[in-house]
Image (cartoon, rainbow, N blue to C red):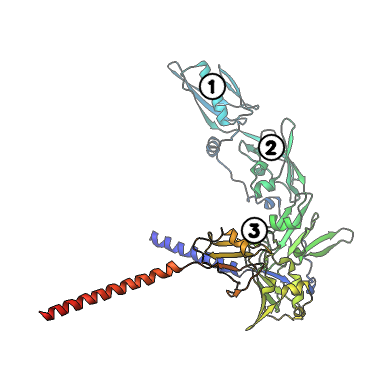
């Protein structure tokens, strides 16, 4: 039964992986023609973009986990950083001659552990393991061979004051492993998650970023609290609400320097499929007019947009359009085009763009819109347009940078524009020392690439015969520069290789004839008898 369940689980995993790959293969960037202009959309009211509570902004649970006294002791012992806390209780056992001595100890308000008759240990800057070794060392000093043992029997507690942007000042109970994030649940939605101040008993203070601690995993920003600490919650200075077609909607407090790009990628986790990246809606309250101002940002324009306090950012789903064209091949299909990545330069990633075109829009307008997404290895002169059963060669480079009349060709729904990859290499094979693929260098001839392959090998034909084939496999005559994607073939001397089968056949025939002659001789001799 267990084996059947295992097999079933493996089948489900395979099916899920296959479905995910198929979905990813079909995904593509949707771009709308700039001829449409900004699409009118209604203002989203503030009530529809719900302001998250302080706990929801940080992803805190509904309520903190309450540990029993025994669980606290176990956690303290197993933790390597449990600090000595006022009220900690210990049991010390050691031998005094033939007598066993048992003493209960406790850390006072200054974390001093007093050992009756022997001395004391200052544990204010020690953790549990360090304090234990210090106490045992004191006992060994006065009682050699006493085999002392120290056990933590109970953990101490203390209180922390929470003030500032809170529903009301709170005195919160804490213990040695209580972190800052566990005592701030009384904060209002307007409290800052990026600047929480902790003031120690000695008057020193430090500011912590709870967003980085709880959302990004930087635990140094969520410190352990100490007795006498005062936690001050400041008011947020730049709070932005994010909604719409995005992975993580919510209320975010941005760091200095963070703009729209950081909000969408780092805070919001990225955009979902079919997001209208050409019309990112930003709603900003105008205090003078008492209304919401709405403006749109096109991510394809590049750059960043600065956001202000209480801005609302909405990612709309792109409006459906009946007229669209598919662009495939050597194009960047990410949310922001980056042709400098190794993948883009090597040409291994084939992109797909769904372009919603304006009625009567032509090919030149289309190419001008996506020009920023063409790669350095896009074969513009080798492009072609598929329209039904017809294949139309497209001189994209002349259309973009010249005055080619083909650019006036009107787009039609269902068209597919294919832009091949122009691989910048030359292949050398045949009678050379090292056959292989070499980087294309402009204005270099046959001898350059043969020298890269180590020169002619010993089995090269004489006189030398070198042929060059183009990307389509057809022989081309080369006198100067070798074009990219060409194949150079150096003929080999195959006389010995060709002669060997002939000699083998002659030897076989001779053997067969000799055998036949021997048989005939025996037959004739037999008849004479």
Q: How many residues crowd around disc 1 within 10 Å: few (fewer than 14), some, or many (20 or more)?
A: few
Q: Nearer the viewer, mark 3 or mark 2?
A: 3
* The N terminus: image quadrant: bottom left
Task: Please tell me whether mark 1 or mark 2 is closer to you in this view.
Answer: 1
Badge 3 marks a residue whose secondary structure is helix
Instruction: Give coordinates of residue 18: x percent, y percent.
Output: 52, 66
User: Mark 1 or mark 3: which comes first in sequence?
Assistant: 1
259 above or below 517?
above
Q: Is residue 210 above or below residue 450?
A: above
Tally the marks: 3
Quarter of the figure with residue 349: bottom right
Question: Could you tell me which secondary element the residue under label 1 belongs to?
Answer: helix
- Quote the CA–CA distance across marks 1 and 2: 33 Å
Figure quadrant of residue 474: bottom right
**Front position in the image: 466 or 81:** 466
- Classify residue 449 as left or right of residue 373: left
Residue at the extreme left of the image, as rendered: 529
Residue 311 coordinates in the image, percent (x, y): 79, 58
């Amino acid at each position: 039964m267990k084996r059947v369940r295992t097999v079933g689980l493996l089948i489900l995993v395979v099916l899920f992986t296959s479905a995910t790959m198929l979905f990813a293969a079909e995904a593509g960037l949707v771009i709308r023609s700039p001829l449409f202009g900004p699409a009118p959309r209604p203002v989203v009211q503030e009530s529809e973009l719900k302001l998250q509570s302080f706990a929801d902004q940080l992803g805190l649970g509904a309520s903190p986990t309450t540990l029993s006294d025994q669980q606290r002791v176990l956690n303290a012992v197993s933790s390597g950083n449990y600090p000595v806390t006022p009220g900690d209780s210990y049991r010390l056992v050691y031998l005094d001659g033939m007598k066993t001595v048992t003493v209960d100890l406790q850390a006072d308000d200054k974390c001093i552990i007093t050992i009756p008759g022997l001395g004391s240990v200052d544990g204010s800057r020690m953790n549990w393991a360090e304090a234990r070794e210090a106490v045992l060392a004191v006992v060994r000093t006065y009682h050699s061979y006493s085999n002392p043992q120290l056990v933590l029997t109970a953990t101490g507690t203390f209180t922390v004051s929470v003030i500032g942007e809170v529903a009301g000042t709170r005195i919160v109970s804490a213990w040695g492993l209580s972190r800052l994030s566990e005592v701030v649940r009384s904060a209002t939605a307007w409290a800052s998650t990026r600047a929480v101040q902790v003031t120690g008993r000695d008057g020193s203070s430090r500011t912590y970023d709870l967003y980085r601690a709880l959302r990004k995993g930087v635990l140094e920003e969520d410190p352990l609290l100490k007795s006498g600490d005062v936690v001050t919650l400041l008011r947020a200075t730049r709070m932005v609400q994010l909604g719409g077609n995005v992975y993580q909607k919510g209320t975010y407090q941005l760091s200095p320097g963070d703009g729209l790009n950081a909000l969408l990628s780092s805070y919001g986790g990225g955009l979902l499929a079919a997001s209208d990246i050409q019309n990112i809606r930003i709603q900003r309250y105008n205090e003078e007019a008492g209304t919401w101002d709405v403006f749109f940002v096109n991510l394809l324009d590049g750059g960043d947009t600065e956001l202000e306090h209480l801005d609302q950012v909405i990612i709309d789903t792109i409006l459906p359009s009946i007229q669209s064209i598919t662009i495939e091949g050597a194009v960047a299909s990410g949310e922001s085009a980056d042709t400098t990545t190794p993948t883009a330069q090597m040409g291994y990633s084939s992109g797909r763009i769904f372009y919603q075109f304006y009625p009567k829009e032509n090919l030149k307008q289309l190419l001008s819109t996506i020009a920023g997404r063409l790669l350095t290895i896009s074969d513009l002169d080798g492009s072609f347009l598929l329209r039904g059963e017809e294949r139309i060669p497209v001189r994209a480079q002349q259309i973009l940078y010249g005055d080619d009349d083909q650019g006036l060709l009107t787009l039609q729904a269902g068209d597919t524009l294919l832009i091949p990859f122009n691989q910048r290499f030359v292949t050398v094979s045949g009678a050379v020392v090292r056959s292989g693929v070499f980087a294309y260098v402009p204005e270099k001839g046959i001898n350059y690439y043969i020298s890269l392959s180590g020169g002619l090998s010993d089995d090269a034909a004489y006189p030398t015969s070198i042929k060059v084939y183009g990307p389509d496999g057809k022989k081309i005559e080369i006198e100067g520069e070798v074009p990219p994607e060409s194949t150079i073939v150096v003929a080999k001397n195959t006389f010995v290789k060709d002669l060997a089968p002939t000699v083998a056949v002659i030897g076989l025939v001779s053997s067969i004839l000799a055998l036949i002659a021997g048989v005939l001789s025996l037959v004739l001799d037999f008849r004479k008898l």
